Amino acid sequence: MVVQEIQKNYVFPRIPLKFQLPENYPEVGCISSISVVPEIRDFRLNREEMEIRGSYQVTVSYFEALNQSEPDKIREIEYDDFFSHLRLRADGLITDSGEELPAGTGRSSQELNTVQFERPFHTFVDLEFINRPRNFKPGLIIERVNLEAGEGCSLKGELVLSLINRPRRTHR
Amino acid sequence: MEVSQGPDYRYYKANLYPPVQPPGGVLEPFGTVEIEITGPKGRMNCRTHQCLGLFAETHPRIKYQVMLQKEMDGEPVVIGHLSVDRSGCGVLKWDFSTAGSDSGEGIPVTYKLLIAARHDAGLRGKAGGGVLMSGVISLKSAVRDNRVVGFKKEVKVREKGRDIKERNPFFEKVEPFQPPIPNSVWWRIGVLPDSYWQTGFCPRQKSNKAMY
């Protein structure tokens, strides 16, 4: 089964995203994943336009920013050395360290921090851009999301939503 | 007008990072995974960045597996292989279903997505073996592959003589080439009819013997 091809009707202008992390959250190092759930609360149709009210929920998971100075020094020595896999033991003997590099996003020891934001929206769409408004059940899909770490404890980015028609099924 | 009884559409985007941070450099994503889940159906689009040059001509033989690992320590399941698109990025599209796996308790299921070179596939039990990049994503419900595995539908060839050939003892099926050529059927005439050896009337030929 393939996901039902959805006819795209109308792409909204981009929404600038600006989120401030709540207190006691660490600074953003790199963003692991973003999840967006748009939801239409209610909509109204009249002759010229459609009024849509709803919200979108953005969930961001990120890794904490590292203090760059110290780990880099250690890494440099480790990886530039040809015998990097040999470790000098305390008694002066050299042993082959069988341990492998940790898998993960380079920071498996770190925790994934997750923050959730919810923003309401309220827009009007010209009916010219929508075909078949008779049998219209509006739905929102995500066209594009970008999110980056801003200055301090903030997140910056943009979100592009698009309006689609998702009519109800006549049969089960 | 009341529209929604909860959202049935979700969008996820995860960055894929290399397993080891380059010394002195900033960790930048090597690729992205986009997941769209509409009701029980979902689609995953995986894309690596062009600058990696995974499909450069220097190592054209290497295949890159995309693997999904549940709960950070389950066995990784191979979803598919990256293919090249026009711009030289590695691309994979995967359709899945989440039907019947929604726990209803709102507990997210954490998945780890790994991209590994294929010749290192044996190392996947070990941590970090051959993994080029990985990403973590937590979905609302568990993911199930909806590709049909058991059936292999073949294209039916409507040949007139084919049925007869299969029943005919004079024709036996052979596979002259090793390894066999796909989509080809080879026949050998097993027992030759008598008329095969009888030469026709030829005035120049002295004897009427068969020539071997």
Image (cartoon, coloured by chain):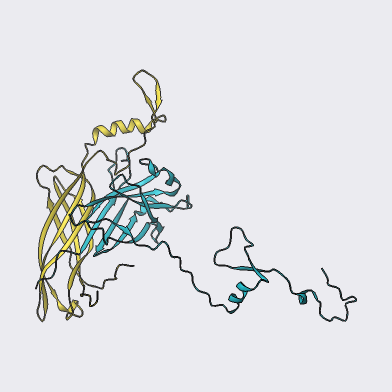
Chain colours: A yellow, B cyan
Direction from residue B8 to residue B128 in the image, left or right: right
Q: Residue at x 33, y 56 (%)?
A: B47
Between residues B56 and B14, which one lies in front from this camera angle?
B14
| Quarter of the image that includes the N terminus of chain A | bottom left
Q: Is residue A138 above or below residue B68?
A: below
Residue reaching furthest to the right: B206
Residue A152 at x, y = what percent? 14, 45
- Horizontal relation, residue A52 to residue A145: left or right: left
Examine the image and state in which quarter residue A139 appears: bottom left
Side of A168 relative to B112 (left or right): left
Image quarter hosting the C terminus of chain A: bottom left
Residue at 11 percent of width and 80 percent of height: A48
Q: Position of residue B212 (x, y in %)?
A: 82, 68
Relative to A62, B59 lies left or right:
right
Q: Residue furthest top?
A: A91
Residue placed most toward the observer, B142 or B118? B142
Q: Is residue A21 above or below residue B166?
A: above
> Where does the image place residue B97, in percent across and percent down from the top left?
30, 62
Residue drawn at the location 17% of the way across and 66% of the way down? A13
- Residue B197, compared with residue B138, is above or below; it is below
Q: Residue B190: x, y in percent?
A: 69, 68
